Amino acid sequence: MCIDCGCPTAAPHHHDHDHGHEHEQVPGRTIRVEESLLAKNDRLAERNRDRFSAFRLLVLNLVSSPGSGKTSILERTLADLKGELAFAVLEGDQQTANDADRIAATGVPVKQINTGAGCHLDAHMVGHGVDGFDLGLTDILMIENVGNLVCPASFDLGEDHKVAVLSVTEGEDKPLKYPQMFRAANLMLINKVDLLPYLRFDVEKCKSFARQVNPQIEILELSCHSGEGMTAWYDWLRENVSKKRDAGWVTRRA
Protein backbone atom coordinates (compact mmCIF):
# COMPACT_ATOMS: atom_id res chain seq x y z
CA MET A 1 0.00 0.00 0.00
CA CYS A 2 1.24 3.47 -0.87
CA ILE A 3 1.83 5.58 2.24
CA ASP A 4 1.10 8.81 0.39
CA CYS A 5 -2.14 8.06 -1.39
CA GLY A 6 -3.10 5.07 0.80
CA CYS A 7 -4.42 3.22 -2.21
CA PRO A 8 -3.95 -0.57 -2.24
CA THR A 9 -4.86 -0.93 -5.92
CA ALA A 10 -4.15 0.81 -9.19
CA ALA A 11 -7.73 0.20 -10.36
CA PRO A 12 -10.16 3.18 -10.37
CA HIS A 13 -12.13 3.31 -7.15
CA HIS A 14 -14.03 5.66 -4.84
CA HIS A 15 -14.19 6.11 -1.09
CA ASP A 16 -17.93 6.56 -0.69
CA HIS A 17 -19.72 4.62 2.04
CA ASP A 18 -23.01 2.82 1.58
CA HIS A 19 -23.75 3.12 5.29
CA GLY A 20 -24.23 6.09 7.60
CA HIS A 21 -22.35 5.40 10.84
CA GLU A 22 -19.39 7.44 12.13
CA HIS A 23 -15.96 5.77 12.01
CA GLU A 24 -13.93 5.78 15.22
CA GLN A 25 -10.64 7.60 14.68
CA VAL A 26 -7.47 6.19 16.22
CA PRO A 27 -5.03 9.09 16.63
CA GLY A 28 -1.42 8.29 15.80
CA ARG A 29 -1.95 4.92 14.15
CA THR A 30 -1.30 6.13 10.57
CA ILE A 31 1.78 8.05 11.62
CA ARG A 32 3.27 5.00 13.38
CA VAL A 33 2.71 2.80 10.31
CA GLU A 34 4.39 5.35 8.02
CA GLU A 35 7.35 5.78 10.36
CA SER A 36 7.84 2.03 10.59
CA LEU A 37 7.69 1.54 6.81
CA LEU A 38 10.06 4.43 6.05
CA ALA A 39 12.47 3.41 8.83
CA LYS A 40 12.84 -0.04 7.29
CA ASN A 41 13.27 1.45 3.81
CA ASP A 42 15.87 3.93 5.10
CA ARG A 43 17.94 1.12 6.66
CA LEU A 44 17.95 -0.74 3.34
CA ALA A 45 18.76 2.48 1.47
CA GLU A 46 21.83 3.01 3.67
CA ARG A 47 22.89 -0.55 2.87
CA ASN A 48 22.51 0.23 -0.85
CA ARG A 49 24.44 3.49 -0.44
CA ASP A 50 27.32 1.73 1.28
CA ARG A 51 27.41 -0.88 -1.48
CA PHE A 52 27.35 1.75 -4.26
CA SER A 53 29.96 3.89 -2.54
CA ALA A 54 32.32 0.93 -2.25
CA PHE A 55 32.38 0.89 -6.05
CA ARG A 56 32.42 4.72 -6.32
CA LEU A 57 29.28 4.35 -8.41
CA LEU A 58 27.18 7.44 -9.26
CA VAL A 59 23.50 6.54 -8.78
CA LEU A 60 20.70 8.71 -10.17
CA ASN A 61 16.99 8.27 -9.47
CA LEU A 62 14.97 9.69 -12.40
CA VAL A 63 11.49 10.76 -11.31
CA SER A 64 8.65 12.42 -13.22
CA SER A 65 5.06 12.22 -14.32
CA PRO A 66 4.27 9.53 -16.93
CA GLY A 67 5.15 10.72 -20.43
CA SER A 68 7.74 13.34 -19.51
CA GLY A 69 10.37 11.61 -21.62
CA LYS A 70 12.58 9.86 -19.07
CA THR A 71 13.11 6.78 -21.23
CA SER A 72 13.83 8.88 -24.32
CA ILE A 73 16.40 10.94 -22.39
CA LEU A 74 18.02 7.70 -21.24
CA GLU A 75 18.09 6.23 -24.75
CA ARG A 76 19.83 9.26 -26.20
CA THR A 77 22.22 9.61 -23.25
CA LEU A 78 23.26 5.97 -23.41
CA ALA A 79 23.71 6.08 -27.17
CA ASP A 80 25.82 9.25 -27.03
CA LEU A 81 27.98 8.41 -23.98
CA LYS A 82 28.24 4.62 -23.79
CA GLY A 83 31.71 4.66 -25.36
CA GLU A 84 32.87 7.14 -22.70
CA LEU A 85 31.02 6.09 -19.52
CA ALA A 86 29.78 2.66 -18.42
CA PHE A 87 26.07 2.57 -17.54
CA ALA A 88 23.61 0.13 -16.01
CA VAL A 89 19.87 0.80 -15.85
CA LEU A 90 17.04 -0.29 -13.57
CA GLU A 91 13.61 0.26 -15.09
CA GLY A 92 10.57 0.63 -12.84
CA ASP A 93 7.00 0.27 -14.12
CA GLN A 94 3.82 -1.29 -12.83
CA GLN A 95 3.57 -3.64 -15.83
CA THR A 96 5.35 -4.51 -19.11
CA ALA A 97 9.02 -4.57 -20.06
CA ASN A 98 8.54 -2.02 -22.86
CA ASP A 99 11.03 0.53 -21.51
CA ALA A 100 13.61 -2.15 -20.60
CA ASP A 101 13.39 -3.47 -24.17
CA ARG A 102 14.14 0.02 -25.51
CA ILE A 103 17.15 0.38 -23.20
CA ALA A 104 18.40 -3.13 -24.05
CA ALA A 105 18.50 -2.11 -27.71
CA THR A 106 21.28 0.38 -26.85
CA GLY A 107 23.46 -2.50 -25.60
CA VAL A 108 23.51 -1.27 -21.99
CA PRO A 109 22.82 -3.77 -19.15
CA VAL A 110 19.24 -3.29 -17.95
CA LYS A 111 16.76 -4.95 -15.60
CA GLN A 112 13.03 -4.41 -15.34
CA ILE A 113 11.27 -4.18 -11.98
CA ASN A 114 7.47 -4.46 -12.17
CA THR A 115 5.76 -3.11 -9.08
CA GLY A 116 2.28 -4.50 -9.81
CA ALA A 117 -0.14 -2.23 -7.94
CA GLY A 118 2.76 -0.32 -6.36
CA CYS A 119 3.41 3.25 -7.48
CA HIS A 120 7.12 3.59 -6.70
CA LEU A 121 10.37 1.69 -6.32
CA ASP A 122 11.73 1.13 -2.82
CA ALA A 123 15.21 0.37 -1.48
CA HIS A 124 14.53 -3.36 -1.18
CA MET A 125 13.63 -3.61 -4.88
CA VAL A 126 16.73 -1.67 -5.92
CA GLY A 127 19.03 -3.70 -3.65
CA HIS A 128 17.97 -6.92 -5.35
CA GLY A 129 17.63 -5.27 -8.76
CA VAL A 130 21.35 -4.55 -9.05
CA ASP A 131 22.32 -8.16 -8.33
CA GLY A 132 23.98 -9.46 -11.47
CA PHE A 133 25.27 -6.07 -12.63
CA ASP A 134 29.07 -5.76 -12.60
CA LEU A 135 29.15 -2.65 -10.38
CA GLY A 136 32.94 -2.59 -10.43
CA LEU A 137 32.86 -1.90 -14.16
CA THR A 138 30.00 0.63 -13.99
CA ASP A 139 30.28 4.43 -13.71
CA ILE A 140 26.59 5.37 -13.51
CA LEU A 141 23.54 3.44 -12.36
CA MET A 142 20.38 5.04 -13.76
CA ILE A 143 17.16 4.18 -11.93
CA GLU A 144 14.04 5.11 -13.90
CA ASN A 145 11.34 5.24 -11.26
CA VAL A 146 7.63 4.61 -11.83
CA GLY A 147 5.96 7.66 -13.41
CA ASN A 148 4.55 9.44 -10.38
CA LEU A 149 5.37 12.82 -8.82
CA VAL A 150 4.12 11.90 -5.34
CA CYS A 151 5.26 8.60 -3.78
CA PRO A 152 8.85 8.32 -5.14
CA ALA A 153 9.75 11.52 -3.27
CA SER A 154 9.38 9.74 0.07
CA PHE A 155 11.57 6.72 -0.66
CA ASP A 156 15.33 6.91 -0.38
CA LEU A 157 16.80 4.26 -2.69
CA GLY A 158 20.43 4.88 -1.72
CA GLU A 159 20.87 7.18 -4.72
CA ASP A 160 23.20 10.16 -4.91
CA HIS A 161 20.67 12.45 -6.59
CA LYS A 162 17.02 12.51 -7.51
CA VAL A 163 16.66 14.03 -10.99
CA ALA A 164 13.17 15.41 -11.63
CA VAL A 165 12.13 15.49 -15.30
CA LEU A 166 9.39 17.94 -16.26
CA SER A 167 8.28 18.32 -19.87
CA VAL A 168 6.92 21.52 -21.37
CA THR A 169 3.72 19.70 -22.27
CA GLU A 170 2.89 19.73 -18.55
CA GLY A 171 1.95 22.78 -16.50
CA GLU A 172 4.73 25.08 -15.34
CA ASP A 173 3.19 25.03 -11.86
CA LYS A 174 4.03 21.35 -11.25
CA PRO A 175 6.74 22.31 -8.69
CA LEU A 176 4.11 24.14 -6.64
CA LYS A 177 1.56 21.34 -6.94
CA TYR A 178 4.04 18.59 -6.03
CA PRO A 179 6.62 20.44 -3.90
CA GLN A 180 7.93 17.39 -2.04
CA MET A 181 9.33 15.91 -5.25
CA PHE A 182 11.09 19.10 -6.37
CA ARG A 183 12.34 19.72 -2.82
CA ALA A 184 13.89 16.24 -2.82
CA ALA A 185 15.53 16.64 -6.24
CA ASN A 186 18.98 18.11 -6.82
CA LEU A 187 18.45 18.63 -10.54
CA MET A 188 15.41 19.41 -12.68
CA LEU A 189 15.48 18.70 -16.42
CA ILE A 190 12.96 20.71 -18.43
CA ASN A 191 12.46 18.40 -21.41
CA LYS A 192 10.90 18.79 -24.88
CA VAL A 193 11.94 22.45 -25.24
CA ASP A 194 11.78 21.98 -29.02
CA LEU A 195 7.98 22.16 -28.58
CA LEU A 196 8.00 25.57 -26.87
CA PRO A 197 7.02 27.51 -30.05
CA TYR A 198 3.74 25.59 -30.10
CA LEU A 199 2.84 25.74 -26.41
CA ARG A 200 1.98 28.21 -23.68
CA PHE A 201 4.62 27.10 -21.20
CA ASP A 202 6.51 29.83 -19.34
CA VAL A 203 10.00 28.43 -18.71
CA GLU A 204 11.12 31.28 -16.44
CA LYS A 205 7.97 31.01 -14.35
CA CYS A 206 8.54 27.25 -14.03
CA LYS A 207 12.11 27.85 -12.85
CA SER A 208 10.89 30.43 -10.35
CA PHE A 209 8.30 28.02 -8.95
CA ALA A 210 10.92 25.28 -8.61
CA ARG A 211 13.28 27.62 -6.74
CA GLN A 212 10.48 28.70 -4.43
CA VAL A 213 10.29 25.16 -3.08
CA ASN A 214 14.02 24.37 -3.47
CA PRO A 215 16.38 27.37 -3.81
CA GLN A 216 19.37 25.04 -4.37
CA ILE A 217 17.90 23.02 -7.24
CA GLU A 218 19.91 23.02 -10.47
CA ILE A 219 17.90 23.39 -13.68
CA LEU A 220 18.78 22.42 -17.24
CA GLU A 221 16.64 22.88 -20.36
CA LEU A 222 16.95 20.23 -23.05
CA SER A 223 15.32 18.26 -25.82
CA CYS A 224 16.27 14.64 -26.29
CA HIS A 225 14.54 14.87 -29.71
CA SER A 226 16.47 17.82 -31.19
CA GLY A 227 19.57 17.45 -29.01
CA GLU A 228 19.31 21.01 -27.68
CA GLY A 229 20.79 21.28 -24.19
CA MET A 230 22.03 17.69 -24.08
CA THR A 231 25.67 18.80 -23.89
CA ALA A 232 25.01 20.57 -20.57
CA TRP A 233 23.35 17.39 -19.24
CA TYR A 234 26.32 15.30 -20.31
CA ASP A 235 28.71 17.76 -18.65
CA TRP A 236 26.65 17.51 -15.44
CA LEU A 237 26.99 13.71 -15.58
CA ARG A 238 30.75 13.86 -16.18
CA GLU A 239 31.23 16.34 -13.33
CA ASN A 240 29.27 14.20 -10.87
CA VAL A 241 31.02 10.97 -11.89
CA SER A 242 34.31 12.75 -11.22
CA LYS A 243 33.08 13.99 -7.83
CA LYS A 244 31.99 10.48 -6.86
CA ARG A 245 35.34 9.00 -7.85
CA ASP A 246 37.18 11.67 -5.86
CA ALA A 247 34.89 11.30 -2.83
CA GLY A 248 35.39 7.55 -2.55
CA TRP A 249 33.36 6.08 0.29
CA VAL A 250 30.41 8.35 0.98
CA THR A 251 29.41 8.85 4.61
CA ARG A 252 25.90 8.06 5.69
CA ARG A 253 23.24 10.70 5.38
CA ALA A 254 22.30 12.65 8.51
Image (spheres, grey):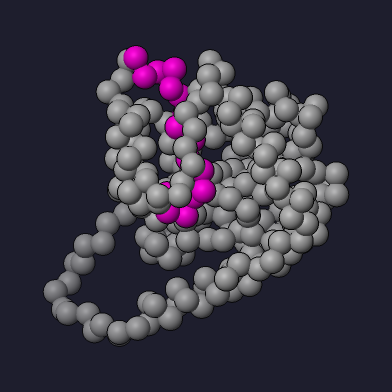
Left-right relation of 222 to 206: right
Magenta part of the chain:
181-197
Quick check: 43 above or below 90?
Answer: below
The answer to whether residue 157 is seen in the rendering is yes
Q: Position of residue 188 (x, y in %)?
A: 47, 40
Residue 180, above or below 21: above
Residue 199: name its quadrant.
top left
Q: Is 119 included in the stretch rendered in magenta?
A: no
Kindly indicate the quadrant of the structure image that contains residue 9. Answer: bottom left
Q: Position of residue 156 (x, y in %)?
A: 56, 61
Decide: is 26 above or below 126.
below
Of the 4 image quadrants, the one containing the C terminus is bottom right
Between 32 and 202, the one lying in front of the other is 202
Out of 235 and 149, give the one closest to the viewer.
Answer: 235
Q: Is residue 196 magenta?
A: yes
Q: Nearer the viewer, residue 47 or 184?
A: 184
Residue drawn where x is 31% and y is 54% of the image: 13
| Residue 216 in the image, given as x and y percentages of width and height | 45, 49
Please tell me whether residue 155 is drawn above or below residue 38 in the rendered image.
above
In the rendered image, residue 46, in percent from the top left (x then y), is placed at: 66, 67
User: What's the residue at 21%, 62% (across, down)?
Assistant: 16
Q: Is residue 218 left or right of residue 61?
A: left
- For the question of whether residue 133 can be seen, the reply is no
Residue at position x 56%, y 18% from top?
227
Residue shown at 73%/43% (left/top)?
Answer: 242
